[in-house]
Image (cartoon, helix red, strand yellow):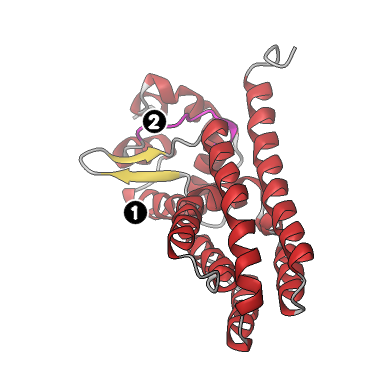
Amino acid sequence: MNPQSALAPASSDLADLIARTPARHRTATGFVEATLRAAILSGRLSGGTPLRQEDLAAAFGVSRMPVREALRQLEAQALIDFVPHKGAVVTEISAADAADTYAIRLALEPAALALSIPNLTADDLARAADLIADMDGEPDPSRMGELNRRFHMSLYGRAGHPKLLALAESQLAAFDRYLRFHLAAKGPEHLSQEDHRAMLAAAAEGDIGRATDVLRRHIATAADTIARFFAERLSAENPFAAR
């Protein structure tokens, strides 16, 4: 079968990408995952594009097993979603949605941290330190959002305002997919563990001003990084867009 004939017209760019990508990976799964990842992050496969296993297997010239495993890895990176009755589709994440999420976090979390710091216990601080260590050693991107949420909430948890904490935690949970997408796009070094350590150190010293300053910078830097990513992708798709 001609690989390109297995793809929908909207995925013709993927066929071209497969043809141009050297098979440097040791496994078929690695080749499929890396090629699809590049296509999604570059915007060649837009949000909402269906990724049918049988079509992909034909396009890549492999069985469905490595395709299935590659799709699971991409789901862990928040690059695809599995939708009932549709199967795998490319995740729809936009610059505007990301900006909204970061703006809400920036409004809620410094307030929660400032209220919580005077009430933090030694156990709270030890738990936060353990979670930083867990993130340092975690190879699975699907767990990074949960660990990040637990770290932040360990520092916010003594704020004494249940509704504020519920809102902050719900936004951190929603942020999970953006964090995983962010790490897939920019690499794990952009998790800003140094900011986490600096925030914890300031909280341990009871320095509310320094801790909230670090948190605001942490969120703002992440927001700027993902905004630049989307802007660069748009510019690559349409060189005249920025003129």
Q: Residue 65 carries which label?
A: 1
Relative to 75, 182 lies left or right: right
Task: Identify the magenta region.
Answer: 41-50
Residue drawn 55% across the image and 31% down it: 96
Instruction: Give above or below for 120 relative to 109.
Output: below
Quarter of the image for the N terminus: give it.
top left
Q: Tell me the tag on residue 27.
A: none
In three-dimensional space, the C-alpha distance between marks 2 and 1, rounded to whole angstroms, equals 21 Å
At label 2, the amino acid type is: Thr
Q: Is residue 45 left or right of residue 84?
A: right
The residue shown at (77%, 71%) is 207
Q: Is residue 81 or residue 70 the one in the foreground?
A: 81
Question: Which of pointers 2 and 1 lies earlier in the amino acid sequence?
Answer: 2
- Label 1: state its secondary structure: helix
The residue that label 2 is drawn on is 49
Quadrant in the picture for the C terminus: top right
